[in-house]
């Protein structure tokens, strides 16, 4: 017959795992956004390379239109880098908050305030990532010249 202490420990661990499920879903969404941002960054880099290695470009420099597009690509790259940094920070904070919940359960410590603080910081970083992403998308749309 199992002892009451081991039953309580298993119950505590089960509860901690249940509490960790929501942050894991958040990690999934952050990972998805990071994948989208990485793809956008790769496209920006590819476009910049295509502009600089374009055959028939003037030998002494770039045309004004190419320079203007390169400036926009630079701004877009900075926004995507900020979004990637914010998203990665959010993911790391979520991971640390999950680890803190488990550590608190193991050592029987009250970690409510640190975990809540980490989660709030993670959400702030995720919101920042989404704002930078939105700014980059709007800049890309605004710079698009359709005939």
Image (tube, grey):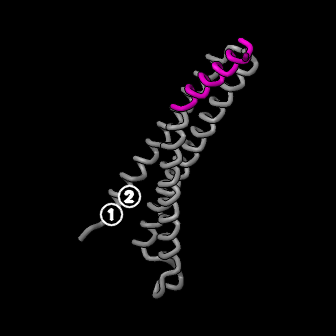
Q: Residue furthest bottom?
A: 56
* Residue 67 at x, y percent in the picture: 46, 69
In this rendering, the answer to whether 32 lies above or below 103 is: below
Closest to the observer, 110 or 146:
110
- Tell me, yes or no, whether the highlighted magenta stretch contains residue 10: yes
Q: Which mark is residue 102?
A: none
Label 1 sits on a secondary structure element that is loop
Q: Residue at x 39, y 72 (%)?
A: 65
Tell whether label 2 touches label 1 (CB within 8 Å).
yes
- Tell me, yes or no, whether the highlighted magenta stretch contains residue 58: no
Per the rendered image, the range of residues in magenta is 1-22
* Side of 21 relative to 134 (left or right): right
Label 2 sits on a secondary structure element that is helix
Closest to the observer, 71 or 22:
22
* Side of 62 relative to 103 (left or right): left
In this rendering, the answer to whether 99 lies above or below 68 is: above
* Residue 26 at x, y percent in the picture: 51, 37
In this rendering, the answer to whether 70 lies above or below 122 is: below
* Side of 136 relative to 106 (left or right): left
* Residue 74 at x, y percent in the picture: 50, 60
Q: Residue furthest left?
A: 147
* Label 1, residues with CA under 10 Å away: few <14, some 14-19, many ≥20: few
Q: Residue furthest front?
A: 1
* Label 2, residues with CA under 10 Å away: few <14, some 14-19, many ≥20: some
> Considering the image in quadrants, where does the C terminus appear?
bottom left
Residue placed under numbered mark 1 in the picture: 144
Q: Kindly report the distance in space between the C-alpha atoms of the residues bearing marks 1 and 2.
A: 6 Å
> Considering the image in quadrants, where does the N terminus appear?
top right
Q: Which mark is residue 140?
A: 2
């Amino acid at each position: 017959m199992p002892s009451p202490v081991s039953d309580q420990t298993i119950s505590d661990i089960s509860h901690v795992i249940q509490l960790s499920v929501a942050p894991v879903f958040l990690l999934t969404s952050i990972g998805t956004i990071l994948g989208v941002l990485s793809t956008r960054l790769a496209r920006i880099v590819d476009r910049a390379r295509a502009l600089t290695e374009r055959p028939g470009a003037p030998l002494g420099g770039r045309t004004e239109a190419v320079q203007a597009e390169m400036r926009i690509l630079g701004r877009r790259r900075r926004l995507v880098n900020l979004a990637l940094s914010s998203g990665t920070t959010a993911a790391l904070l979520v991971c640390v908050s999950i680890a803190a919940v488990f550590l608190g359960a193991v050592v029987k410590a009250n970690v409510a305030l640190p975990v809540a603080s980490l989660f709030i910081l993670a959400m702030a970083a995720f919101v920042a990532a989404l704002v930078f992403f939105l700014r980059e998308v709007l800049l890309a749309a605004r710079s698009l010249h359709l005939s």
